[in-house]
Image (cartoon, grey):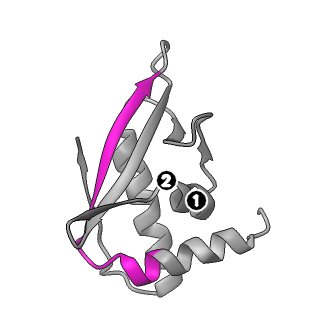
């Protein structure tokens, strides 16, 4: 198991204070590799009618790497909705740390 960094806990605090039950996380698929095995996906939520990009926080919290332009997360895999996979992973981790099984996130691909 990887040692948790200060950035990990800072990202957790951000999610804990800014994400609420049934919030929607919007996803933009910016690039799909030629093989179809890798995607660059950008994530954001809307707070006070302003987009809040979550890429850096998701990267720090869930150990995904950023693409070379730092505008999306690199997600490997195929055969399923990979944006859903990341949002579900975030939801599961938040449930684990907060001991709240009712914490649910929605996702939408734009």
Q: Is residue 94 above or below residue 30?
A: below
- Magenta-drawn segment: 15-32
Q: Is residue 67 left or right of residue 108?
A: right
* Secondary structure beneath label 1: helix
Q: Judge whether residue 20 is colored magenta.
A: yes
> Residue at image x 50%, y 42%?
71
Q: Position of residue 77 (x, y in %)?
A: 50, 32
Q: 2 or 79: nearer the eye?
A: 2
Q: Judge whether residue 72 is colored magenta.
A: no
Quarter holding the C terminus? top left
> What mark, if any, has residue 62 been given in the picture?
1
User: What residue would you read off at disc 2?
Assistant: 55
> Residue at image x 50%, y 70%?
93
User: For residue 30, which quarter of the picture?
Assistant: top left
Number of numbered discs = 2
Q: Position of residue 96 (x, y in %)?
A: 50, 78
Q: Dot 1: few (<14), some (14–19), or many (≥20) neighbours within 10 Å?
A: some
């Amino acid at each position: 198991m990887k040692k948790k960094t200060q950035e990990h806990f800072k990202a957790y605090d951000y999610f804990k204070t800014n994400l609420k039950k049934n919030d929607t996380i919007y996803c933009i698929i910016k690039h799909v590799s030629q093989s179809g095995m890798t995607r660059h996906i950008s994530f954001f939520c809307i707070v006070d009618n302003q987009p809040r990009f979550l890429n850096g926080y998701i990267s720090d919290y869930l150990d995904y790497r950023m693409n070379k332009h730092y505008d999306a997360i690199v997600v490997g895999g195929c055969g399923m909705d990979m944006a859903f996979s990341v949002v579900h992973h975030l939801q599961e981790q938040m449930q684990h740390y907060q001991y709240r099984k009712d914490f649910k996130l929605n996702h939408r691909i734009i």
